[in-house]
Image: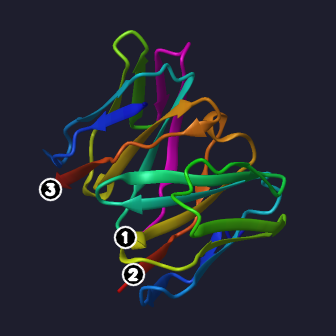
Amino acid sequence: DAGVIQSPRHEVTEMGQEVTLRCKPISGHDYLFWYRQTMMRGLELLIYFNNNVPIDDSGMPEDRFSAKMPNASFSTLKIQPSEPRDSAVYFCASSLVLAYSGELFFGEGSRLTVL
Amino acid sequence: SQKIEQNSEALNIQEGKTATLTCNYTNYSPAYLQWYRQDPGRGPVFLLLIRENEKEKRKERLKVTFDTTLKQSLFHITASQPADSATYLCAPAHTDKLIFGTGTRLQVFP
């Protein structure tokens, strides 16, 4: 398997623009997670899905952030409008079982810079 | 709220020595705890999972301990090598989620 695939790897945009990050989980994994990593706050869970259904979005910072999973092989994280404080590396991860009891497989991340 | 502390200072050790990294957590009692390795510009990679009823877990040169009384996990790498240089993240589980520490950077020099 190719692992979790994220795109784009790097995104530079201007404040106010819409940003869409994409993720393809490992086939057969029922859980998909979106994390954000910054130097100050480390890895923070934004939202996770089980069988394409959002289960917990309590980590989504505000209404500017939204995530969807239209099918088992694709998810998007959208920021509209983007702000400089959204600059971070965004990771997608998938797993066979619920996160705490099994390993998470992470993608290589999407580095977002908002000017 | 849940808090996880890992030594933010980098740990520098000589090749062949044992590296010991510390993870302390407060305000909750995780049933599971995981450790991940992260290289620069890459996503975290799973290393080990330990359950609350397990005191110790080993995998090759890696050993993890889990002390639920002290609310602490120790991560050991024996016979360390320069290739072990990376950031190591601990992730004690809170209900259905993993909460990650900010990580400790390990540098192994020849």
Which residue type carries mark 3? Pro
Range drawn in magenta: B42-59
Nearer the observer, A55 or B99: A55
**Residue under disc 2 on the same chain as residue under disc 1:** yes
Residue B98 position by quadrant: top right
**Chain letter, disc 1 residue:** A
Discs 1, 3 touching: Cβ within 8 Å: no
Residue B10 higher or lower than B4, as above or below:
below
**Residue under disc 1 on the same chain as residue under disc 3:** no
Drawn side of residue B108 relative to residue A49, left or right: left
How packed is label 2: few (under 14 Cα within 10 Å), some, or many (20 or more)?
Answer: some
**Chain letter, disc 3 residue:** B
Nearer the observer, A61 or B50: A61
Q: Which residue is the site of mark 3?
A: B110
Q: Quadrant of the N terminus of chain B?
A: top left
Q: Is residue B78 visible?
A: no
How many numbered discs, if any? 3
Q: Residue at x 61, y 55 (%)?
A: A105
Q: Which residue is the site of mark 2?
A: A113
Name the secondary structure under disc 3: loop
Spot occupied by residue B109 in the image (x, y as percentages of width and height): 15, 55
- The CA distance from mark 1 to mark 3 is 39 Å
Drawn side of residue A32 relative to residue B49, left or right: right
